[in-house]
Amino acid sequence: MNKNLINFQKINNRYEEIKGLLVDTPLLQSDEINSLFSSNIFFKAENLQKTGSFKFRGACSAVSSLSMEQIKSGVVCFSSGNHAQGIALAAKLHKTTAKIVMPKDAPKIKIQNTKKYGAKIVFYDRDIDDRESIGEQIAHDENRVLIKPFDNYDVILGQGTAALQAINNLQEKEKNSQQKFDAAIICTSGGGLAAGSGTVLKFHNSDCSLYTAEPHNWNDHEKSFELKERFTINSQKHGICDALENPIPGEITFPINVKNGFRGLSASENSVRIAMQMIMRNFNFIVEPSGAIGLACLLENENLLKDKNVLIILSGGNIDRTSYNNIISGR
């Protein structure tokens, strides 16, 4: 398969197949935030998606695409938490088993929720172990299907349904079937959400400006777009955006995102904290740091998207109150 096989029609078809399992999360606005940026900022609240993250979309798409024989064998994935929960629930809904490779320092709430959905967890040390190799070995030994968190065509198709719903939400909200997003800022780890959603956004508006959003220390997409080739982050300093600490853009996703004209943005942890506070103040949402990275990047580029219809995806809300308070306070 190649990048040309990810297109709007395939994403739309997949949406029709799985939409009964998805939450049509709300598209929200704030007068305070619109005024601050002199733009119409629309937030797709994927923190309200099943499992508390957009990742359920891709997981649901991937598991739904398996054959009956593959379903019987079960699945395996590697993830710091949100893809893990998505696969665990998708496997449960399809009455199969899931084994999840997770870092031992993953947020407790993500570990607890993954177990809650019935998956078995295999822990690894993210500083010394290769999670992909562990996942591949389990797949080989137990005849399970390995579902990667972003370098998987079915996952990308599922992630694209976030933008598809957002466009439908926008047109319903504005009572105008011609309404489009002029720009989008999409949180990026391996690039699956960007690849799927960017494809949908470009289909609806070929002039839509697309940006990936990452923390400063893990800005492999930003650097890769500048260099026009995949760049690897060698930093081992982990920060508050645990879900975005992937060192290199996906092999499958990067060419798609280059084709769609993405540019990279990144933000400091202080901007992430401010963004989290703004989201709480305006929407009463507790979002995890990775879920606030899009707004954080806009805070550091206030004049970038003036007088535009801008989509920002609040990618997840899987954080407990104590951790949230510690992060907000800088502890």
Image (cartoon, helix red, strand yellow):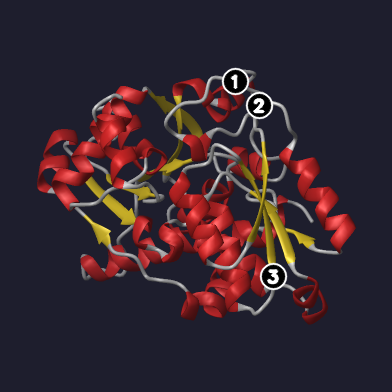
Taking the spot 49% from the left edge, 64% from the top edge, the residue there is 161
Taking the spot 46% from the left edge, 54% from the top edge, the residue there is 201
Which element type, helix, strand or loop, lies under badge 3? loop
Q: Which of the two residues, 16 or 258, is positioned nearer the viewer here?
A: 16
Instruction: Specify the amino acid type for callout 2.
Output: Asp
Residue highlighted by disc 1: 236
How far apart are the two marked residues, 3 and 2, measured between alpha carbons? 28 Å
Which element type, helix, strand or loop, lies under badge 1? loop
How far apart are the two marked residues, 2 and 1, measured between alpha carbons? 7 Å
Residue highlighted by disc 2: 127
Dot label at residue 54: none
Which element type, helix, strand or loop, lies under badge 2? loop
Q: In this view, does 17 lie above or below 210?
A: below
Residue 331 appears left or right of 71: left
User: Does the CB distance between marks 2 and 1 fall below 8 Å?
Assistant: yes
Q: Position of residue 237 (x, y in %)?
A: 54, 19
Residue highlighted by disc 3: 97
Q: Earlier in the sequence, mark 2 or mark 1?
A: 2
Q: Can residue 116 be seen in this view?
A: yes
Mark 1 neighbour class, 10 Å CA radius: few under 14, some 14 to 19, many 20 or more: few
Q: Is residue 11 visible?
A: no
Q: Position of residue 76 (x, y in %)?
A: 72, 58
Residue 86 appears left or right of 44: right
Taking the spot 65% from the left edge, 32% from the top edge, the residue there is 126
